[in-house]
Image: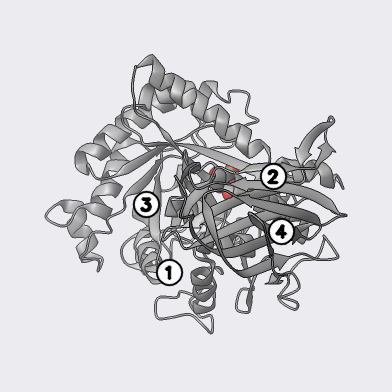
Amino acid sequence: MAKATIILDPAFVVGKTDPRLFGSFVEHLGRCVYGGIFEPGHPTADSEGFRQDVLELVRELGVTIIRYPGGNFVSGYNWEDGVGPVDKRPRRRELAWFSTETNAFGTNEFMNWCVKAGMEPMMAVNLGTRGADEARALLEYCNVGSGTALSDLRHEHGHPDSHGVKLWCLGNEMDAPWQIGAKTAREYGTLARETAKLMRWLDPGIELVACGSSSRSMATFAEWERVVLEETFDVVEYISLHGYFSKHGNRSRDFMAEADWVGRYIDEIVAVADAVAARRRSPKRVMLSFDEWNVWYRTRDRATRTKPGWPEAPAILEELYTMEDALVFGAALLTLINRCDRVKVACVAQLVNVIGLIMTETGGRCWRQPIFYPFQHAAQWARGMVLDMRLTCGTFAAGDGEHFPDLVSAAVLAEDGRSLALFCVNRNFDQAIDTEINLRGLELGNFLESHVMRSDDLNATNTAEEPQRVRPEKGAAATAREGGWRLSVPAASWCVFRFECRPAKNAG
Ligand code: AHR
């Protein structure tokens, strides 16, 4: 059996997880909205057309914040198309995903859905085909109480109360050649700064996210962030990061290591943001919004991501996730948690059907993908203080021979200080890891429970017919030992171990 040691001491913490770390994303893309969260005529649809079966799973998942309406979609979107009487809303050819957009679902439907799902909305404005004035108008429509043309229009549309949207993205992936209205860093930075200025004047209570690079592999990566932050530093709270993990052929080792560039990516953006701050002698720290992340490779190339004939809500980007994907997903999630000092917002892309945590049949059933469970566990138990752990374990070689740790872990002390959750991903496919937890300054309570997700078949997935093939089960207990605990993390598994705990009486 492989071995690992983890040292935990509550005197050494990374920081507190922001609830917004457990966010997701709903884009007008494929069947995420239509046939996903919204399907009038579905047997479980409520009077507003929201699927109750999906809503139940969304609540179970524990998502806190949801980004909308895109993604690439937002860069060609006229928000005015999606408000007011539904029968008057225009149908449009949508150029991000080459589909027909009916606009039957729009801003007010989204806000109502968020209320039902118990989530905070996170809105993106169109800085592709439109600009500062449209963003100002949408903000007025959403957030001003009454007494202005657009707030009164919202009243007329049946929504007297302000939607009170706090968090706004200034466009989406504006560096990307595939983006409608892509820009250079200077063009985007100037536009984002002026848009932010107007939006803040209108509603000083909002928080703003500037677009970072659309991925770490862009040629302009890091220089883009530098220029954009030079322009927007004083008017934004966050810079965005987007990351998708890919498997090439059957290279499982390389795939496992994909999650590890998340940490490097975060370090690099923090360095750029803080360098911009240093040039201004500013104590301000721009935080990170990792507002698109997931495993995505089966449906990623251009040929498979659109369907001919301008279909409505085509079934595109519908990845069926496996146990192996859940390991990479879980490792990336733990990295985000371990960097909660700077990552304050994170959104899994996306919520339903489109590279989704949840799958549906239009008109039929819905089920949880394997990646649903690590997210659910973290959203529930990673709320509190992340301990700055010291982890020693074996490694595996990937790619060009670089070594990566077999075990990825995060330890979170609950806000009330009375329980501790230890999350683990074992990337050793052959051996369990016998893990010693050395506790310092923490008094032992009882072992509470463990949950283990694994499968003999790493390609196992969940389907409508077999919705529970990959799911967590109750795991083995940890055993107390002098000064800590000993536990076993099964080969190729995602695990959570929960303990009662309280600060040691002699903790200094
Ligand atoms: O999430 C799918 C797409 O990936 C988004 O629309 C875009 O922002 C990113 O490239």
- For label 3, the residue is 79
Label 1, label 3: how many angstroms apart (C-alpha)? Answer: 22 Å
Q: Is residue 306 visible?
A: no
User: Where the C terminus falls, by quadrant?
Assistant: top left
Mark 3, secondary structure of its residue: helix
| Nearer to the camera, 50 or 433 | 433
- For label 1, the residue is 117
* Tag 2 and tag 3, C-beta contact below 8 Å: no
- For label 4, the residue is 486
Label 4, label 1: how many angstroms apart (C-alpha)? Answer: 39 Å
Q: Residues within 10 Å of mark 4 (few under 14, many from 20)?
A: some
Residue in the picture at 62% in, 28% down:
218
Label 2 CB less than 8 angstroms from ligand 1: no
Protein image colouring: one colour
Disc 2 marks a residue whose amino acid type is Phe
Label 2, label 3: how many angstroms apart (C-alpha)? Answer: 31 Å
| Nearer to the camera, 470 or 113 | 470
Label 2, label 1: how many angstroms apart (C-alpha)? Answer: 28 Å
Q: Position of residue 118 (x, y in %)?
A: 39, 67
Of callouts 4 and 2, the N-terminal one: 2
* Tag 3 and tag 4, C-beta contact below 8 Å: no
Label 4, label 2: how many angstroms apart (C-alpha)? Answer: 32 Å
Q: Is residue 112 above or below residue 508?
A: below
Q: Position of residue 285 (x, y in %)?
A: 39, 30
- For label 2, the residue is 245
